[in-house]
Image (spheres, coloured by chain):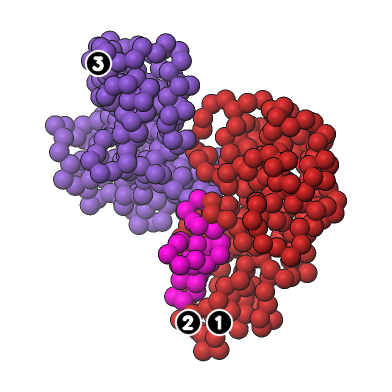
Chain colours: A purple, B red
Amino acid sequence: MTYLFEISYSGVNYSGFQIQPNAKTIAGELMRASKLLFGADCKVQGCSRTDAGVHAKQFFCSVHLPDDANKVPVDRIPAAINCLLPYDIAVKTAKLAPDGYNPRFETVCKEYSYVIYNRAEKNPFFHKLKLPYPYHLDEKMLDSQAKDFIGEHDFTSFMAVGSDVSTTVRTVYDAGVVRDGDDVIYSVTADGFLYNMVRIMVGTLLYISEGKIEAGAIPKIIEAKDRSAAGFTVPPDGLYLTKAVLK
Amino acid sequence: MTYLFEISYSGVNYSGFQIQPNAKTIAGELMRASKLLFGADCKVQGCSRTDAGVHAKQFFCSVHLPDDANKVPVDRIPAAINCLLPYDIAVKTAKLAPDGYNPRFETVCKEYSYVIYNRAEKNPFFHKLKLPYPYHLDEKMLDSQAKDFIGEHDFTSFMAVGSDVSTTVRTVYDAGVVRDGDDVIYSVTADGFLYNMVRIMVGTLLYISEGKIEAGAIPKIIEAKDRSAAGFTVPPDGLYLTKAVLK
């Protein structure tokens, strides 16, 4: 039996989604709660591998159960499993999926958003949920810079050095920066993301804002295929997977 | 030299304000950062003793330094010490205070607010910042109930059993419940608070909402001077010291 869960979570207290020995992970908590609910060990597969400290507002994962697992009416699963999960992980919907369904290979595109808290004063209540950045940000200028990410490109310059992938080409369908009060939010939609890609994009935009990289340089940085041409890697604090579109 | 700091903090990662051996506390972090800034050990005294997990939007503390401490212009202290403090503790203002100034004995009244996240769906991003409560709450009814706390009363029924205090009489100047979107907020202003007083008040209001205690019973519960007459003690998650008024 395979279920597809739509979930959301705060990454603050976790070492990422993916199961790891000796570390608290989202998948590990889902397996623990599933065992209580279904009386059986399960396998969990996510639509993405979010890093330690990264959050998700919409994330899909499949839960594979053996045939002798407890039968639970599928519409009752979210309420039941939410009681067994910690409060920082929520199952929003559950439905039956074809046997062996792996959302990672069914995801057409994903949207990530990175939230910068852009105020001079510290706000203790956004700790690890937004990146504090006290200096002036011109969201209109940054938005026009971000548009240069759009298109099919080799994003080697925006990948953590040493990542092992078969191809570094990705298609960015949309990218932009908006302001919402004190929050400056970078959002990017693509068919896939390289390791640390969004965090290096944001670090590059901040370097442009600070004059450490010149405005208009993003096409040249992409062209360079060299990590050192781009900006720094911002911390995971402000990063959210906000949308995953399945086939 | 004595400074008065106005601070705010998230209590999520701390065992309360008050210094404790072998526990991470707000006062401990302030002492650590002060030692880096002033090059000397200091003593820290708070206007209140918030418990583990309790937050403060406005809190005053005095910082007592020896005469040979580094001299730092007082208007520069907040920016300087904020860089040395973790992000979940913020110094908003600093000023010179009379030698030996202890804000605990200078506080005329304090306001606490308790934030209930009143929605059926879990929201992982308010973890430990609001109390999740999925059932219906009638804020107007609760507001009218809360008015019965106002006045000078013996609040023994609203004090954790075993607390050691010289008097259990406190004057509540104002108390009420409002709704702000999905948040239902109980606020109470008093000259002082007994141990767990606000959390037992909120637990009593929730019991009234659930019909476990009858509406209109608060005067009788106060009269009983018996902890078991009141409701349960809600967790610290939603509790904020929101205002402290100094002489």
Q: Is residue B35 magenta?
A: yes
**Residue B55 locus on image (x, y percent):** 58, 52
Q: Tell me the residue that label 2 is attached to.
A: B40
> Magenta residues?
B9-36
Can residue A163 be seen here? yes
For the residue pair A168 and A52, the one nearer the viewer reads as A52
Residue A222 appears in view: no
Tag in front: 3 or 1? 3
- Residue at image point 50% right, 84% down: B70
The residue closer to the viewer here, A175 or B171, is B171
Question: Is residue A126 located in the magenta-colored stretch of the structure?
Answer: no
Counting from the top left corner in percent of width and height, residue A204 is at 34, 48
Q: Residue under mark 1: which chain is it in?
A: B
- Callout 2 amino acid: Ala
Residue name at image x 33 percent, y 53 percent: A213
Q: Secondary structure at mark 2?
A: loop
Q: Confirm whether circles 2 and 3 share one chain.
A: no
Q: Is residue A6 left or right of residue B178?
A: left
